[in-house]
Amino acid sequence: MICFSVKLVYVNILLTLTRSVDGWIYFFGGSYCDSMSSLLLPMVVLQCTYVGVPPFTNVKDNLPTLGKEEVLFATCTAAGSKPPAEVRWLTGALGDKVRTTTNSTHYDNDTTTTVSSLFGVPTREINGHQVQCVISGDSFFTEETLPFTIQVYFSPTEVNIRAISEDSFECVTEANPSANFTWSRSGQSLLQSAVKVEGAKLQLLSRTSDLNGLYQCEASNAYGRKHAQLYVHVASGTCSAAWASFAVFLFLNVIGAAAWWFFKSGHFQRFFPMHGDEHSDPPSPRSPGDGHGQDHQKLQREVSTVNLLKCECFPHC
């Protein structure tokens, strides 16, 4: 039986619980006034029934790295308990993807240390799953639950650079622990006034030819490193000049196409007959698709030109 309070006929003593390593529980009370006589009573120490020694508990990560063979994920320990504690794992949805073993060591002071180990194959799919170690026994008032998240550690996988906007890029990879990112420029240093780097992100602050070159993003952690590259090209000249040149070019193409069609259709000879052509045979009939195919090829050339000029003004297209 455990004593939680002591009540005398004329005296109430406030008790506090203190646990000892020898397996006994002591209650200490201070000096209080007798409600009848107003006299101070001395300190009272009561030794109650023996209840055992609770263990010191912890879960230790074994730091497994990515692989295909079974390894130890973690150990759950209940050390120095009396009587021995029960240690078990709750693995939830993982089922047969993991297995456990339990070992106990008994010491001369009649205490026991119990260790339960969790094993499995360290894959990316199992990384991040949560499990629980539950410790119980006669030395506990209630069982103790220690949560644990399985961590599989690996170096950065394939590194990709994705466009966030027309002038911003981000380096993306998967790693555990999370990767650190470093941006650099091949053959020369980054222009601090022209670019802005924030972790995995690179932002171009201007669009000048000074930015032209090969940029590299390196992702690294304690287990390895990988990198990806980005080539930046900003065409010289202003976009307004490029678009003006394109407009003139397009206008000349339209005039040329119209003149070509006017001549080939026979209207030119009708309005401006040439000597010796008065009795010329009428133009041979064309299939309906002939003119359309030629016009389509011409349109394709114009679209390529548009894209080229646009890419010169906006080099990220």
Image (cartoon, rainbow, N blue to C red):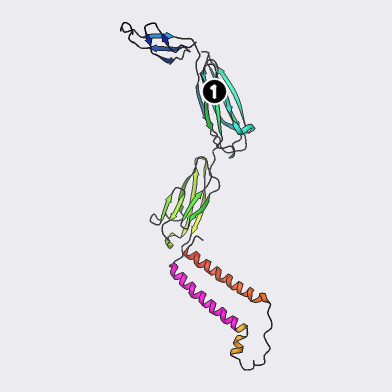
Magenta span: 234-262
Q: Which residue is mark 1?
A: 135
Pick whichever, 8 or 169, lies toward us.
Answer: 8
Image coordinates for residue 138, horizontal then vertical, percent: 54, 16
Q: Is residue 181 magenta?
A: no
Horizontal placement of 288 versus 195: left or right?
right
Residue 89 rendering spot, x and y as whole percentages: 58, 27
Amino acid bearing label 1:
Ile
Q: Quadrant of residue 115?
A: top right
Identify the image quadrant of residue 277: bottom right
Image coordinates for residue 291, horizontal then vertical, percent: 64, 76
The prevailing secondary structure element of the residues shown in magenta is: helix
141 in relation to 34, above or below: below
Helix, strand or loop at label 1? It is: strand
Q: Is residue 293 above or below residue 86?
A: below
Residue 14 image point, x, y percent: 38, 13
Q: Which residue sits furthest front?
A: 36
Image point (50%, 26%), residue name: 58
Mark 1 Cα shell of 10 Å, populated few (<14), some (14-19), many (≥20): many
Task: Count up the numbered dots.
Answer: 1
Q: Nearer the viewer, residue 303 or 218?
A: 303
User: In the displayed image of the protein, which residue is found farthest to the left?
Assistant: 38
**Which residue is located at x 55 percent, y 79 percent?**
256
Residue 172 against residue 118 in the figure, above or below: below
Residue appearing at x 53%, y 24% in the figure: 77
